[in-house]
Structures are given as C-alpha cells and as structure tokens.
Image (cartoon, grey):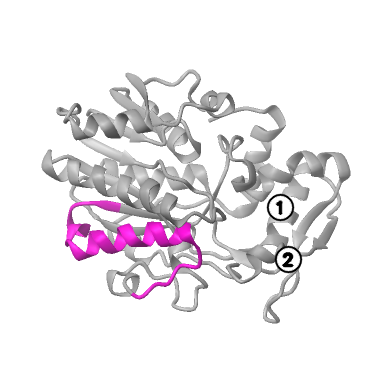
C-alpha cells in the first residue's frame, strides 16, 4: 500500500506513522511544515520514502505528481483554536483539504481526514456524529468552523459513503512536545508540577460546574491512532466518526491522575481564565461512540488514570512514540 500522510511530522500524524511502520507499511510520503527541529524529532528512526513541505506538495498535486498512491491520510492542519484570522483557517484547513479530497476522487484514492470535536461548539446540541445532527452544529471558533465546513462539504456531496472523517476529542500523549500553547495540560504543566508540586487550573464561570469541574473527553493518542488504523485496514467502511472514549472526565480528575502517577500529594490552584476564552469555552465534551461501535470496532480505550501513568513514563524520559 502506498500512502500519503499529511501532518506526518506532527503529533497524531507521527504516532500514526509509528503504527503504520509497526504494521509493516513504509511506502509513505510524509507532508508537513519543515520549520521546527523539535517537531522533526517525532519521526527520528521511523520509516518512510520521502518528506515534502506542505506548500510544495499542494502545488505538485495540481500538476498530478502523485499518481500511483492508494490512500491519503490528511491529518495535517492548523490546530490552534485561538488565531483571529478566519481567512487563514479557510485556506489552510478548508480549501487545502478540499483540494486533496477532489484529487483523491479524481484518482480513485481513498481519503481519510481529521475533523475535530471543536465542531460541536458549546455542546448544547449534543455530541452525536450522526449525519443528521452534524448539519445542525454551530462551532464557537474559526478553527472549529473550518473543520465543520469541510464536514458539511462532504455531506453535501454525499462523500461520507467514500471518505472517512475523524472528529478528534481531547487527544494527549507522546510526540505533542512541539505544540506550544496547544499541548495538553499534562505536557504543558509537567515540569511545573515536578518543580512546584502544584498545578494551576482555570476557575469555572458556569454555575453548573465547580472550579476544575469542567469536563472533557480525554483520549490517549495510542487509542486515537487505533481508531484511525481500523479504517485503514477496513476499506469497506466510511463515514464521519467521533474519536473519543465516550466518558467525560474533569480537569480535577486529570490533575489527580497526574499527581498519583508522580506519587505527589495533590495541590491545585484555581486561576482566572483569560477573557478571550470565556465566551468560547467548552464546559463539557463527551463523544457519542455508538456510530463507531456499529461498524464493529471494539478496541477498549485506556482509563484516564492508566493513560496518564503511561504518558508520565514518556515525559519523565523525554521519549517519543
């Protein structure tokens, strides 16, 4: 199988590359931004045929330079949720993805792509990935909007019967070290906790949730990648699916799991949330996993506690997947 993997040097993409290699697949063209030495450590020791810059790649796509590939795994995108430039998200996330999707259609290549749980907005409409519910969603930020727009394009053109989309919830784990402010809380605060024996969490501005009681569907990257790989090895299955655990856990739970893994007494300080985030903050996310289950997928996901403990072993050693 010949594979094009965009975002292959990034977080989820590089862990997916590791899994592909583990399954004996190495005829892989990696596509990514080539401007971050830390990020490039994600692919050290991994097997692939070539690595190309994402802007050069999309130009060559227009010239039909990639005939003969079987599958496009489009994991790359701008994943920041706070940039103020709607046009950038439009071009980088929506238009880039549509170009690759149209190329895949023309060449009869399979197309699997990353969507996001950010498409669910404030969660008031639930977290069902059924197509009839997807069309109703109202994202809270430009990032979620760009991902949602492509999902809608897929549905409008009835391509959910050919493509596979992944609505990733809160993925965390090894190889996210380059992501800066978009790193998971565990990765971002690990060294601080080791030094100060304390972690800072945002206060709540919603009466239904106590400070630190805001909830997320946290999924370990190893489990997220298994869900993606399931569709690689099952080409008869298509659609847009949630990638989560189906269990909402609080930030307090996450902190407790981290301190327990480090064998340090729990110490949480609640701090003010930046005003720029307050009206766009998701207080609750929980993936509805019924649709994925109907495909026959039954890989059990790790508990938050066991996933955090495993991740701590990587953080302690500064190691990669």
Residue 194 visible, this orientation: yes
Q: Local crowd at mark 2 within 10 Å, few (<14), some, or many (≥20)? A: many
Q: Nearer the viewer, residue 34 or 212?
A: 34
- Image point (75%, 70%), residue name: 211
Whichever of callouts 2 and 1 sits on the residue coming sooner in the sequence is: 2
- The reply to whether dot 2 and dot 1 touch (C-beta < 8 Å) is no
The secondary element bearing badge 2 is classed as loop
- Image point (53%, 30%), residue name: 321
> Disc 2 designates what residue?
212
Q: Local crowd at mark 1 within 10 Å, few (<14), some, or many (≥20)? A: many
The secondary element bearing badge 1 is classed as helix
Residue 106 percent location from the top left of the image? 12, 42
> Disc 1 designates what residue?
257
Task: Relative to 204, say whether 4 is above or below.
Answer: above
The image quadrant that residue 99 belongs to is top left
Q: How far apart are labels 2 and 1 at the CA level?
A: 14 Å
Residue 146 on the magenta segment: yes
Relative to 39, is 146 on the left or the right?
A: left
In this view, the residue farthest toward the bottom is 207
Residue 113 on the magenta segment: no
Camera-near label (2 vs 1) is 2
In the rendered structure, which segment of residues is drawn in magenta?
A: 136-164
């Amino acid at each position: 199988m010949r594979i094009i993997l965009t975002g292959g040097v990034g977080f989820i993409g590089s862990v997916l590359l590791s899994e592909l290699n583990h399954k004996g697949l190495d005829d892989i063209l990696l596509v990514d931004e080539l401007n971050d030495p830390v990020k490039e450590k994600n692919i050290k020791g991994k097997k692939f045929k070539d690595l190309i810059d994402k802007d050069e790649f999309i130009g060559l796509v227009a010239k039909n330079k990639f005939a003969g590939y079987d599958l496009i795994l489009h994991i790359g995108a701008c994943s920041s949720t706070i940039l103020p430039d709607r046009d950038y998200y439009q071009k980088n996330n929506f238009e880039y993805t549509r170009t690759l999707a149209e190329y895949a259609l023309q060449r009869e290549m399979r197309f699997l792509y990353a969507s996001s749980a950010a498409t669910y907005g404030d969660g008031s409409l639930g977290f069902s990935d059924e197509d009839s519910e997807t069309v109703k969603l109202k994202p809270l930020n430009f990032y979620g909007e760009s991902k949602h727009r492509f999902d809608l394009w897929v549905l409008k053109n009835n391509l959910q019967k050919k493509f596979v989309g992944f609505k990733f919830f809160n993925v965390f784990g090894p190889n996210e070290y380059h992501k800066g402010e978009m790193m998971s809380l565990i990765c971002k605060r690990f060294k601080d906790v080791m030094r100060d024996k304390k972690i800072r969490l945002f206060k709540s501005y919603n009466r239904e949730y106590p400070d630190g009681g805001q909830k997320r569907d946290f999924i370990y990257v190893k489990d997220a990648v298994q869900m993606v790989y399931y569709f690689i090895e099952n080409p008869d299955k298509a659609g847009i699916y949630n990638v989560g655990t189906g269990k909402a856990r609080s930030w307090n739970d996450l902190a407790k799991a981290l301190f327990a893994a480090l064998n340090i007494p729990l110490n949480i300080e609640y701090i003010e949330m930046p005003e720029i985030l307050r009206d766009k903050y998701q207080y609750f996310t929980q993936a509805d996993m019924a649709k994925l289950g109907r495909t026959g997928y039954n890989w059990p996901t790790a508990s938050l506690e066991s996933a955090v403990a495993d991740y701590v072993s990587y953080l302690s050693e500064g190691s990669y997947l």
